[in-house]
Image (cartoon, rainbow, N blue to C red):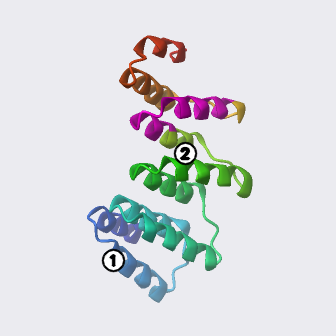
Amino acid sequence: MHSVGILANCYCHLGRVDFGFSLLAKILKLGYPLDSVIFNTLINGYVHCDKLPQAAHLLNKIVKLGFQPDLIMYNTIVKGLCRIGDNASALAFLKKMQFGCHFKPDIVIYNTIIDSLCKDRLLQEALDLFSSTKSEGIKPNVVTYTSLVRGLYNSGCGDDSSAYAD
């Protein structure tokens, strides 16, 4: 199963998600149990190939089959939304996760959105989200601060970046 997962990941990174699905079919044919790893790999493959609608469709099908999405699947969708510059949908997805999931978003999801907001020069939104991480009890890390410092410098507020260095 590990080898098949690695092979599916390689195919997805080569832009051949269809080959990844053929490996999923092979897994089913051989009677191996399905797990979230293969689904995460395929969703990430779609995101990697800028096919976010297909990734979202696959996520919906997975849910309909009775599989519970995990934090990695949600993070992959958020990464895809940020990758295409749809920060509003990423923030909406985050809000949906905060109130509608059996688990809370982690620092990786917050960092993904904060970094995207900073790259799109939406600094105030990034700073607001940064503040909410702390109020949610999530400890920012070096990735969080690096994104904010870069965002501040790119917005011409480089002098203010020392406030976030602590």
For disc 1, the marked residue is: 18
Name which residue lies at 53% across and 49% down: 88
Task: From the top left corner, tell me how far across and down residue 123 is, in percent.
Answer: 49, 30
Residue 1 visible in the shown view: no
Q: Quadrant of the C terminus?
A: top right
Q: Secondary structure at mark 1?
A: helix
Q: Quadrant of residue 140?
A: top right
| Observer-nearest of 32 and 35 | 35
Residue 94: which disc? none
Name which residue lies at 51% across and 52% down: 78
Q: Is residue 135 left or right of residue 144?
A: right
- Residues shaded magenta: 114-134
Q: Secondary structure at mark 2?
A: helix
Name which residue lies at 42% across and 68% down: 42
| Observer-nearest of 161 and 137 | 161
Q: Is residue 78 above or below residue 113?
A: below
Q: Residue furthest bottom?
A: 29
Q: Is residue 12 above or below residue 124?
A: below
Task: From the top left corner, tell me how far across and down residue 65 is, in percent.
Answer: 61, 80
Label 2 neighbour load within 10 Å: few <14, some 14-19, many 20+? many
Residue 109: which disc? 2
